[in-house]
Amino acid sequence: MLGSLKHVSLQQNNIQTLEPWPLYMGTNHTVKINLNFNNISAFTNTMRRKENCGMKTVIRFNLLLYGNPLGHVSDLLSGWNMSLSTTWCFRREYDRHYISLGLPVIYLDCDCGNFVIFSLLLPLHSGNLSEVICNRLITQREDNTIPWEQLVCSLNEGCPFGCRCIHQAANATLHVNCSNANLTDFPLELPMPKSYPKYVLHFSNNRFLRRLEHRDYLVNTSILDISNSSIQPTDSIDVWRSILQIPEVNFYRNQLTSIPKSVVSLNITTRSLNISDNPWSCSCDNMWMSSWLHSIADWLTDPNVPCYTPLRLRDKPIIRTSEMDFCVDLVAVAAAEASRRAWKISLLPVTGVVVVLLSVIAICRSLRLKLYTRWKFHPFDRDECPGEDMDYDVFLCCSSLDDQTSGGRILDSMEASGYRVCYHERDFMPGLIVDNISASVTRSKRTICLLTSNFIQRFANVSFFNVFCLLLFCIFYSPAGSFVTVNRRQLASSIWLMLWSLQYSTST
């Protein structure tokens, strides 16, 4: 308590701890205390001194601590029972307090632990850290002073796996760097010390990060960077309510195609929003985005956010796309209208051609018999027995009296046209004539009966029943018949046998 001393020199000794006696000696007058090149590494307070802003004493002292192995100068505050509030009094009562510290030139930890003493005490005398040697590599300014923002501390407790958490004391923020950390979801929890009110979240370059999810810490976030990830659209308005309250948000190069329309009603406090290089869908459901982006254009890092789909609007800025363009493809409408006009123009001649063709076909079909007779043209021929392996195309039956006059000529004409003809004078086998007739009818696709006067005269005296049977035969075996079965052939064979028997009995 030697209050009359004005200069104390204890340099180059082996002092290891320092009590707050310099504060007592500097009361009401100026004193210079030289403790350079000792071994002081801790500040203690066994003197039980207390400091508060209500004290009216004036403290003036110049404390030199060069060459002492101190890690954090802030240990002086905690060791001498000085709080931040009492330290702030030194700055506020600058006209009454004068404290000068000569900092150590070796082994000082330039981190957030020294930020308090650097920012509050040093500006009282010089504010220059040019003589401080830091234990870690930092970038000094051109005037050899240390930037405050580089006074940071790493946090491991509570920090998500694969991330780095850093406390930056200069702006009271906790930086959580999870870039390239293979995140698949937002971390459930983050370190939440009371002295770090704001988060700076770096979640960029995580290709497996696809979902936007609400987290409580988003409310206390000042910067959110999710660029170069794979964020997908979400309809959760709670998530967007939290995100659009963050001052700076970066969604650059993700997979966002839309935003819930309900964001229009939110009170957006974001002042920097980057949503560029996303595959935005300019569909009719998203036509509201044009006016919404126009209303927040001052906050967008790139107001000309382009459409990605549909193809007709690709690369066109959403903010300059009208609502009609979202819902109506004007090019397609014009093309469709032109197509309809062309169709109407071409429909008339096509209809005329079709009518003419149908008319020609109808006329040809109605006159097919004449065409058959005059031009030997058979466009409507069809095989009534497809797939059947038969020996003859036709069985030609006629009276023996007509063989020389008509039968032979018809036979030659059909065989000249390539038809295989069964003729009784040539092809009947020795045996019963009844068996030959039955075999010829069964083995032929057609049966032609030449009803000449010679053939009818044979039946002049036959009963009406026999004539009716003859008509049945002609009906069943006419070219227009379309159903041929084994039972019908058997019935026809029986009728033929009966008619042939009648003809034979008459001739005999």
Image: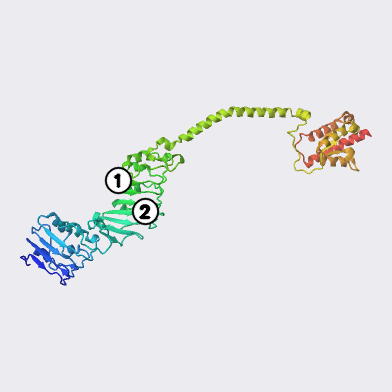
Whether label 1 touches label 2, CB < 8 Å: no
* Front-lying residue, 447 or 28: 28
Q: Which residue matches tag 1?
A: 271
Residue 335, relative to residue 217: is it above or below? above
Q: Position of residue 199 (x, y in %)?
A: 29, 54
Amino acid tagged 1: Arg
Residue 156, relative to residue 409: is it above or below? below
SS of the residue under disc 2: loop
Q: Position of residue 78 (x, y in %)?
A: 18, 63
> Which residue is situated farthest in the right direction here?
508
> Position of 146 compared to 321: left or right?
left
> Position of 83 compared to 207: left or right?
left
Q: Quadrant of the N terminus?
A: bottom left
Q: Which residue matches tag 2?
A: 204
Q: Which residue shows up at 31% across the image and 48% down it? A: 248
**Residue 462: which quarter of the image?**
top right
Amino acid tagged 2: Ser
Q: Position of residue 355 (x, y in %)?
A: 64, 28
